[in-house]
Amino acid sequence: MDGMQLPAAAALTARYGAGAEPKLGPWNDTMALLLSHRSVRGYRPDALPAGTLESLIAAAQSAATSSNLQTWSVVAVNDPEKRKALAEIAGGQRHIEQCPIFLVFIADVSRNERLGHQEGVSLAGMPFLETFLVAAIDAGLAAQNAVVAAESMGLATLYIGALRNDVPRVAAMLGLPPGAAPVFGLCVGYAAPGKESAVKPRLSQEAVLHHETYSTTKEKALRASYDEKLAEYSKRYEMAADNWSQRVISRIGSISALRGRDGLKAALRSLGFPLK
Amino acid sequence: MDGMQLPAAAALTARYGAGAEPKLGPWNDTMALLLSHRSVRGYRPDALPAGTLESLIAAAQSAATSSNLQTWSVVAVNDPEKRKALAEIAGGQRHIEQCPIFLVFIADVSRNERLGHQEGVSLAGMPFLETFLVAAIDAGLAAQNAVVAAESMGLATLYIGALRNDVPRVAAMLGLPPGAAPVFGLCVGYAAPGKESAVKPRLSQEAVLHHETYSTTKEKALRASYDEKLAEYSKRYEMAADNWSQRVISRIGSISALRGRDGLKAALRSLGFPLK
């Protein structure tokens, strides 16, 4: 085993658990960086090097964007009062108040709508679900590039989907125009001591990657094996020792667990997305 | 200017155009890789190193996923007849037939639905727009990690949003169960000679990045300046010399330009996403 394979093998074991590693393929420093991702829920208050935000946004804007429409925006929020309100909306996530950079990613068709108004053209494609979906996916591609860039600088990150608990309140707080809706937040900063967390195992590749057609043949066995791995991970690093199946059920087993996101469609409509 | 700043400055100029570069921040090899992204529309047929697909999927699965629900899947399609049909659905995109790896990313809540059935639990959170949106965004985060991994190996990529032109036909071709819908495709391979393409400039950071609240004060001027840059890029590298505003208008100015995607909501409902 040469010097390149050792970290590769260890990284794949951390990500999939012993015995569930996929075939070892091409490996390099970027692969090592991507495989080492962890979500971090506690940040040092330390300021970041000058220009960090601009570098993250340059990375984000370098991601692909459907037909170059660039239908996303981002709001950097520093005001402590706003941070506190956003943390509350997200169900009391204190790291939103701690992290030196907090970004709200916006599905934003409003810029192109203004373009249409200014050019005297009605943009008939705007009111469709497709247009919102493109904006939300492109915000995701952009944010993931920002995450990779941040992690390459030794910074940690955390996506905050719970901003969708109250999309209209977040939109009002940020002064968003119609046609702009927050889709998620992102914490960026140095992990606080003891909060670095560990790589979390995922489902086996066989459960997620299909060839030619979708197959569920091995799925039940793969889930049973993953349930064991995640219960072990939870026991070691988290409070509860739930397995994966229990967590999925508690997360989407009831409408109350959506914490208001069952109203997302109505909320998006109120913000100017007809979702036709 | 030291050795690190020169490539950084050049990369920012390529991405934003001369005079529109953001403040120079932290820079490293990963930043250089992310900033150099180009969409490539022509591939060499050469096979890729063994294990390339597995490495890309390991990178994809290492991206964050909301509450670890992992509600996405991917189908690797090699069958030439299927490739041809997918290229047709996408409006005659021949690179879908050429590239050595073609992936269809799936918003997939069906795995968790099967989990619920097998455990005898009804998952009340399933039928909501929120649940589909999480699946689509998480597919985006995963795919972007695969793109970064591919580019780190010297490979090129292209997202294929045009698979959404006929979501039910793609789903049938791949044998997707209810609760699984294709959201986009991804070409991966070595760029064919002459098809490497150039870094495409984006809107100025000031148009996309807001501080504390959303602002449109400078937007019209920023758009005018970007229109010039993109017209110049188009004249140099593409057929038409359209500016950005013209392209946005032609892309979303009519329902026919959506090429069937105005029916996306009905299509998703037919695939088992009620989008409540």
Image (tube, coloured by chain):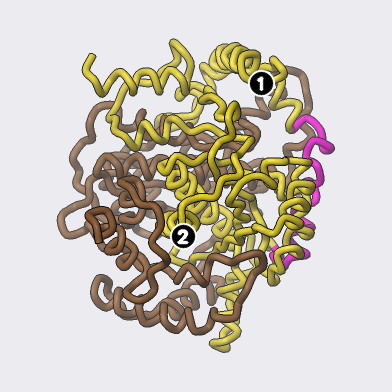
Chain colours: A brown, B yellow
Q: Is residue A152 visible?
A: yes
Q: Residue at x 57, y 88 (%)?
A: B120
Circle 1 is placed at which residue position? Answer: B238
Vertical arrangement, residue B58 with respect to residue A215, above or below: above
**Considering the numbered disc 2 on the image, is that residue within a helix, a strand or a loop?**
helix
Q: Is residue B273 magenta?
A: yes
- Crowd class of label 2 (few under 14; some 14 to 19; many from 20; radius 10 Å): some
Vertical arrangement, residue B184 with respect to residue B72, above or below: above
Circle 2 is placed at which residue position? Answer: B54
**Considering the numbered disc 1 on the image, is that residue within a helix, a strand or a loop?**
loop
Q: What kind of residue is marked 2? A: Glu
Q: Chain of mark 2?
A: B
Total marks drawn?
A: 2
Q: Is residue B125 magenta?
A: no
Residue A238, picture quadrant: bottom left
- Crowd class of label 1 (few under 14; some 14 to 19; many from 20; radius 10 Å): few
Q: Is residue B83 or residue A115 the one in the foreground?
A: B83
Q: Residue at x 26, y 47 (%)?
A: A98
Q: Chain of mark 1?
A: B
Vertical arrangement, residue B196 with respect to residue B189, above or below: above
- Outermost residue toward the bottom? B120
Q: Is residue A127 or residue B47 the one in the foreground?
A: B47
Task: Identify the image quadrant of the N terminus of chain B.
Answer: top left
- Give the foreground label among 1 and 2: 2
Residue B162, picture quadrant: top right
Q: Is residue B227 visible?
A: no
Which stretch did the figure color magenta?
B252-274
Compared across the picture, whether A106 is left or right of B41 comes to left
Q: Are marks 1 and 2 in contact (CB under 8 Å)?
A: no
